Amino acid sequence: MRWRVDKKTTVEECKSISTTFLKQHDYFCGFRWGGMKWTNSMGEETGSISFRVSVQEWTGEIRFQYTQTQTYSGERESLDYPVRFAATPCHLGGKRWWFICPLVKNGIACNRRVLKLYLGGGKYFGCRHCYNLTHRSCQEHDARVDRLCKNPALLYQLLNSKRLSTSYLVFRAALKLKGYL
């Protein structure tokens, strides 16, 4: 999954479930059972989850049911727990459904309203803030390259300095200016 120690885990690496998926599949209409599967890039199943959705006018709950295998011990644990929903009115009518993050961090319940929950290294689904997740695009972008592209004099100065510590940065800025990045 992660290839560098100093990089955060990304949301793209985690299993997730969104209220958008639930809405597209008509789960916000009373009481419904369902599930979903996750696959890798080769189409092989990497996980599945069953859930039961129960909603009233502006509140509701989803009950997650899945089995998780511990990475190091191989021990399997069956999990079954609820996560609350809340709805807010949209400006042009209708409503938007949100998960209420069920995780507790540093002894304080998160209760953040989010559109997606992630299985980010723990055994329970929670928001990206609780799991300290980031997006892949945030790790790929380097603001220092942008600054060098906006300041050609500094780029030229670093190019001529022959300092090994800045050579990769200068190289990336030059590629970006040429349109390769």
Image: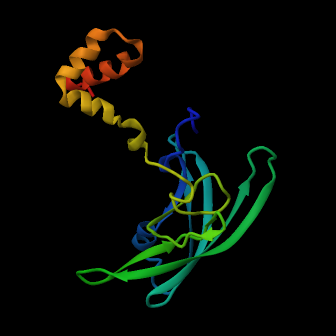
Q: Position of residue 121 (x, y in %)?
A: 63, 51
Q: Vertically, is 161 above or below 87?
A: above
For the point 80% across and 47% down, the residue is 74
Percent of width and height locating residue 114: 45, 68
In the rendered picture of this protein, how many numbered marks are placed on residues? 0
- Is 35 rendered above or below residue 138? below
| Viewer-side residue, 146 vs 24 | 146
> Is residue 137 positioned above or below 173 on the image?
below
- The image shows residue 160 at horizontal and vertical percentages of 26, 9
The one of 53 and 4 positioned closer to us in this rendering: 4
Residue 95 lies in quadrant? bottom left
Q: Residue at x 55, y 35 (%)?
A: 6
Residue at 31% x, 18% y is 171
Q: Is residue 53 visible?
A: no
Q: Which image quarter is the C terminus in?
A: top left
Rendered location of residue 123, percent (x, y): 68, 59
Q: Quadrant of residue 105?
A: bottom right
89 to the left or right of 87: left
Q: Residue furthest bottom?
A: 57
